[in-house]
Amino acid sequence: MDIERDFDMVEIPVEGVAAYWLAISKLLEGKKNSKILEKEAEYTSEPYIRHLLELCLTSLPDERLLELAAAKRDTLLAELARKFDLMRLTLLDMTANENPRKTLAKMTAKFAAPPVSEDRAIELAQELSQAEPGQNPRLYNVDHRMKNEQLVVALLFYAGMARREGKMALADFLEFVHSTFFTEGVHLVVDGFDGPFVRKRLRVHKEAILDEARHKMDMAAQLCVAVRGRLSYEDVFRVARSYMA
């Protein structure tokens, strides 16, 4: 049975989280060692799932495992929220035709230590504006999985382009953007919705994404405990159903 390792906790549906752990449960049936879990932990790129797999391999009691899983969940969700905030403030500044340098100052204020200096961010954003997007499209991506410095530079590029060439120019670059949150926000900006509406719409959407991610993470933690406890496939499925509508 194949297991989908390279998924994203934000984008995967709750049914996908259930299917992942059910597949592991099926593979572990009748096996006494933990080689399967070790292999999954080595090759899984999703940080929260990898953390759970590593916890599965410890001798920690279930209660402690769940505490550590919750700590990791909160850490990852806080970082995710910050990245959505960076996108949100950039989109709001686009609606107000704000000076991109002010946008950059607002973004770097979100960090105790800026991930990239303002001079360097401006330099890199200017390089993007002078290049051909088709030659290296990944540099024009906006996505919550990006490193902070890459995200800041990409957002600064879009803020500068919107002010320099007009909001309509943003639509031509959406093919390079992986983030649904940012893409939908750009559509709002291009369509001319006012700032207060865009602010509220993006805030509500951000909260919905974080709430759903939290739900899937809590589900995954409980399924991890069930799998580690070698519950039957049917009982693991019962745990999964408790988190599904």
Image: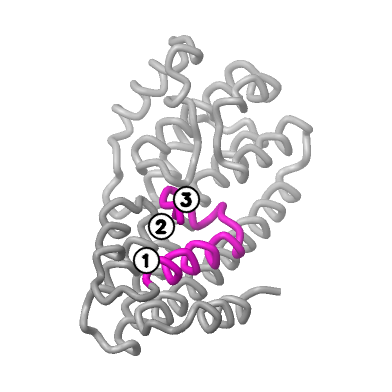
Name which quarter of the figure residue 166 lies in: top right
Please, what secondary structure does the residue beneath circle 2 have? helix
Q: Position of residue 236 (x, y in %)?
A: 51, 79
| Boundaries of the magenta span | 1-28
Q: Is residue 196 above or below residue 127?
A: below
**Residue 14: within the magenta?**
yes
Q: Is residue 35 left or right of residue 100?
A: left
Q: Which mark is residue 62?
A: none
Please, what secondary structure does the residue beneath circle 3 have? loop
Please, what secondary structure does the residue beneath circle 1 have? helix
Work out how far the residue at label 1 is from the one at label 2, CA to CA, in angstroms.
6 Å
User: What amino acid is labelled 1 in the image?
Assistant: Thr
Q: Are marks 1 and 2 in contact (CB under 8 Å)?
A: yes
| Residue identifier under label 1 | 75
Name which quarter of the figure residue 71 lies in: bottom left
User: What amino acid is labelled 2 in the image?
Assistant: Glu
Pick whichever, 231 or 30, lies toward us. 30
Residue at image position (56%, 41%) is 179
Q: Position of residue 142 (x, y in %)?
A: 50, 36
Residue at image position (64%, 62%) is 208
Q: Nearer the viewer, mark 2 or mark 3?
A: 3
Pick whichever, 162 or 186, lies toward us. 186
Q: Nearer the viewer, mark 1 or mark 3?
A: 3
| Residue identifier under label 2 | 79
User: What amino acid is labelled 3 in the image?
Assistant: Phe
| Residue identifier under label 3 | 7
Residue at image position (57%, 46%) is 88
Quadrant in which the C terminus is drawn: bottom right
